[in-house]
Amino acid sequence: MKKHAVSRRKFLHSSAIAASAMAASGVPSFAISGNENKNIKIGLIGSGSRGRGLVSLLKAMPGLDVTACCDIVPEHLQQGVSEAGKNAKGYTDYRKLLDDKAVDAVIIATPLFLHSKMAIDALNAGKHVYLEKSLAYDIPQTLDLVKKVKQSNLVFQVGYQYRYYGLYHKVKEVIDKNWLGKITHFECQYNRNSNWRNPVSDPKLERTINWRMYREYCGGPLSELCAHEIDMVNYLLASHPLKVTGMGGINYWKDGRDTYDNVRTVYEYPNGIKASFTSVLSNAYNGYGIRILGDKATVEIQREKAFIYSESTDNARGIVDGVAGATIQATTQGKAVELTYKNTPEEIEPTTFALTDFFACIRENRKPISNVFNAAESSIAIHMGNMAMDTETFQTWKPEYSI
């Protein structure tokens, strides 16, 4: 996640622009009504690199105070409190933070296996919750968390920030206007050339720091890297997958990890649409990308840009295959045309849009765009994919998953 120093004036201006962009995309406005003079008090649970990055964004937002941080790693806790400010309290037990009556809302940025328990405890403590993706460690936890949120009148948002990103709103508009024609495939990848490890000062902290290496704590590349792309395909198709198969393995980084260092899954969505999700940790070529294949055009989505390529209708005869006697029809790909989208300032990244909406939802008492229901569908899809790879079978969407 990029860090940006955003002035109060620039943030307010950009937030107004963001509100206009979201209104145009069917996303509720960020206009704040009531309690606008009362700062929202935030507690951060998990002050590792992601948590501290979120605090750096929060500090630039008006009407908020980060008053507490929690982490079990002393260095992370010290860095979190330092980032939040001198008045922030530090905790090593998140339950003590939840007991703090001054805290209105919590941001949970911890390893995946802790998400459900911490989120439920936060709701029980009367705190609004911003939970980093993905939603929960397994399908039963996912379904239990949905039930708990349904019973609550608190705001519960999940960190699938691309649902707030104008780039994907534009791609969805292109799809809805049928510019691509009949869509048949999505090709998604999130590749890195890295062992994915962080340095450890104390060997006793190996599994705590490098939790992504171990199945005890997360779902590997599918839950930690491909999750955003799975959520975006669900968003763009307004659906969830029906079944999935795939393969994974530890073929390169033989360093004691037990989460895969490469995954390849294929999901089937309604109308026979296939979506592949790939993550390779030994080659970073093209890094992050989504390609949407239609019979009229293709869209290629990169980190901050998207391009559309029209399909040629020129099927003029090409050369003749002398062996088979068949005519090879040459169909050429159109040139790339960049998709433009309005009202997304460069200095405001998707996470800032998502956080802004979270606090607006608290003030306005409304449901976030990235909520427990669509996050649960993405979470279940992730777990189906991992089960398919582990068992070398097809996994199908069960009736009880539909929430």
Image (cartoon, rainbow, N blue to C red):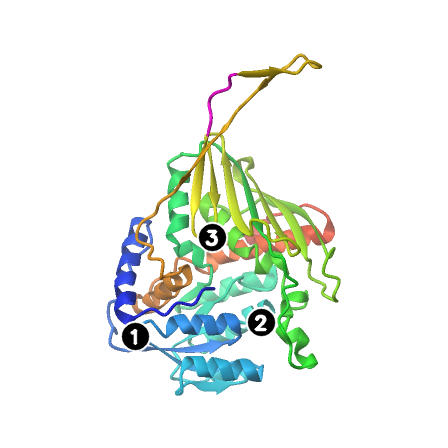
Label placed on residue 63:
1
- Where residue 364 appears, x then y in whole percent? 30, 66
Mark 2 closeness class: few <14, some 14–19, many ≥20 residues within 10 Å: some
* Residues at marks 3 and 2, CA–CA distance in whole angstroms: 29 Å
* Residues at marks 3 and 1, CA–CA distance in whole angstroms: 30 Å
Task: Describe the element under mark 1 as helix, strand or loop.
Answer: loop
Mark 1 closeness class: few <14, some 14–19, many ≥20 residues within 10 Å: some
Disc 2 residue type (three-letter):
Leu
- Where residue 129 appears, x then y in whole percent? 44, 70
Numbered range of the magenta stretch: 311-316
Report which residue position mark 3 lands on.
303
Mark 1 or mark 2, whichever is nearer to me: 1
> Is 240 in front, or is 303?
303
Disc 3 residue type (three-letter):
Arg
Disc 1 residue type (three-letter):
Gly
- Where residue 211 appears, x then y in whole percent? 64, 70
* Residues at marks 1 and 2, CA–CA distance in whole angstroms: 29 Å
Report which residue position mark 2 lands on.
114
- For marks 1 and 2 on the same chain, the one whose residue lies earlier in the sequence: 1
Mark 3 or mark 2, whichever is nearer to me: 3
